[in-house]
Structure formats: structure tokens, C-alpha cells
Image (cartoon, rainbow, N blue to C red):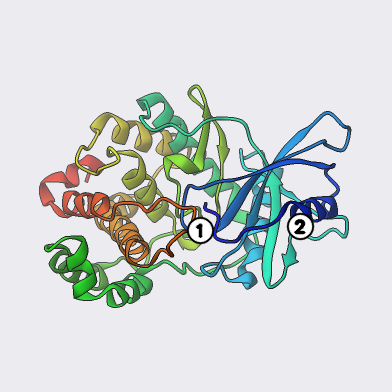
Amino acid sequence: MAVYTQLGAEALADLIAAFGVGELRSAKGIAEGVSNSNWLIDTAGRDGEGARFILTMYEARVDLADLPFFLGLLDHLAARGCPVPATIHDREGKSFRFVGEKAVALIEFLPGVSVSEPTPAQARAVGEALARMHLAARDFPGQRANAMGLAQWRAFAEACGRDGFAAIDPDLAGLVERELAELERDWPRDLPRSVIHADLFPDNVLMLGDRVSGLIDFYFACVDITAYDMAVTHAAWCFDASGKRFDPAISAALLAGYEGVRPLSDAERAALPILARGAAMRFLMTRAYDWLNTPAGALVTRKDPLAFARRLRFYADPANSDIFGT
């Protein structure tokens, strides 16, 4: 989330009116993240008692042709009891509208907070919620390839270049070249696939105590290796923000929560070490690219690429493969 595009008060009021959710009371830009422009919206509500929503404007990284997949997936999962925000359709029944050439969507606001230091009980709940999401999406008809998959990691690496990596850290180019070559050689090709979230970081999970109250920000969702989604979530939840400290209790709880709902096959479990290396590479690449290319003046906080370089080194160390029970 971020604010790359500014909208004036009158434009926002007209836009919210088109969704029929009551008169606009306030709109506040949200700075976290790097992909879209987002606002926290408060309205009078249809009944006059007040309502809250998230307004998203899709920026350059989102293909407009993918919006029916993203927004349809939210409605599909919400209808099956998953804690995800449903899309607010406008007065014409559309799930998104246009402001100029950019699409905008309004979704439900879900209560809860994102945790920065999760407990094992919270990690277990996240694993359970992720597994339930995978099962609930089995009959979702949409198809979308992973636009941030293996081929794109190579493209990001080439866009950053050795000089760009050197500007971040002198050892980064060597790590990326070595790991990309091994991932391209050894990436699994025959594991079960499904709709995956692909970005389930703590700031994309809302919690009330030990209960997951919301899974949000599905704008990287796609059809890919199901166990890769667990690897992404593992990389996101099981380290401190710097990537320097791994928490084995969080790891064990996350995996136990997931397998309590959807047990991993032997092949999926055996693949988790390389899937986790891929997960770390994916976020290392996008963070490095954003570090070097975020526009000046954007209301967005750049994220440290080295936090995922450290995770990548951890997962690449054979001594650590037993964290997945392999």
C-alpha cells in the first residue's frame, strides 16, 4: 500500500458516491507497501451510522486485466467464510471503476491489528487460515499466472544490474547470481498447484488476540505451487524484521497450524527448503528493485532488501533444512 496518485476532496467524494455507501466523511492516505495507492475511507454509511472501507487505486505494477481475478477471488473466499474483505460493487454492479486511466476498487474494512512480534499461537492461527484459504479456493474458476515467479526474478536482477546491487551491498550481486542459477536448475515442476496469496506478510494479516480476523491485500494472488505459499509465509513470519534472527517456535507453530488443516505431502515437505529459498529471492529482488527505483516524493517507505538476503543465506545453508522436518 502507498499513495502514488493524489485525489482531491471533490474527486474522492464523487467516487465514493458512485458506490452508494453514504456521504464521504474522511479519507486518509495509507503509506505502507509499494504497489498501489490506498486510502482509509470513512462514510456516513447507508443507514447514517457510519462505515469504513479501503479504497485502492491500481498503479503501474497491476495489470487491469487481472482485476476480475483479484476481486472475484475476494468475493469467492468471503462467501465461503474465509476472513477476507468482500468487494463493494458500485451502483451499476461493477466491482471497480476508473478515475482517468486508473482503476479503483472499494473493499470492506476488517477490524484487527497487524502484529510485529507474533506469538506461536498467532502463527498457528495464520497457518490454519492459510490452509483454509487454499481449500476454499479449490473451486474458484479464475486463472492467473504468477507474475512475480521465477522468470521475473531474473528480469529484476538484470534490471538492477551489478552496479545497482553493489550500491546496496558489495556482496549482493554474487549471492543473487549463485542462488538464481541454482533455483532455475532445481525449481520443482510437479507439485500440487492452487490459488495462492503469495504475499502473506504480517501486515497483510489482521488479528484480534490469537484469532485471524482478516487476510488482506490479495493483489499478488495467482495459481502456483501450493506449498510455495507456505514458504512465502514462513519467510515472512519466522524472522525478525532485519532477517537476522530466526524463531524456531514460530516456525513450528506455523507449520503445525497449516498441516492441522491441510497436511503436506512428502514431496511438498521435501521441496520446502528450495521453495523457501525462492520465496526469499522473490522479495529480495522486488525490494532491491524498489530500493533503486522508488519515485522521489512518493508517500511510501522503502523496505530493506538485505533483510531477505539474510533469509536467503539461512535457507540456503543445508544445516537449516531440518526446520521443515526434511
Rendered residue at 20%/65% (across/down): 167
Q: Position of residue 127 (x, y in %)?
A: 43, 37
Residue bearing the label numbered 1: 194
Label number found at residue 11: 2
Left/right of residue 200 with respect to residue 23 in the rendered view? left
Residue 21 in view of the camera: yes
Distance (Cα) linking label 1 and label 2: 39 Å
**Figure quadrant of residue 287:** bottom left
State the SS at label 2. helix
Which amino acid type corresponds to the residue marked 1 in the rendered image?
A: Ser
Q: Earlier in the sequence, mark 1 or mark 2?
A: 2
Residue at the (71%, 44%) spot, across then down:
79
Do we see residue 179 in this rendering? no
Camera-side residue of 45 and 244: 45
Q: Residue most toward the top? A: 209
Along the viewing direction, whichever of 195 and 66 lies nearer the viewer:
66
Looking at the rendered image, the disc whose residue lies closer to the viewer, 1 or 2, is 2
**Image position of 45 (left or right of 303):** right
15 versus 43 height, above or below: below
Q: Secondary structure at mark 1?
A: strand
Answer left or right for 313 relative to 224: left
The picture places residue 2, in percent across and down from the top left corner, at: 52, 53
Please name the residue shown 84% across and 58% down the image. 93
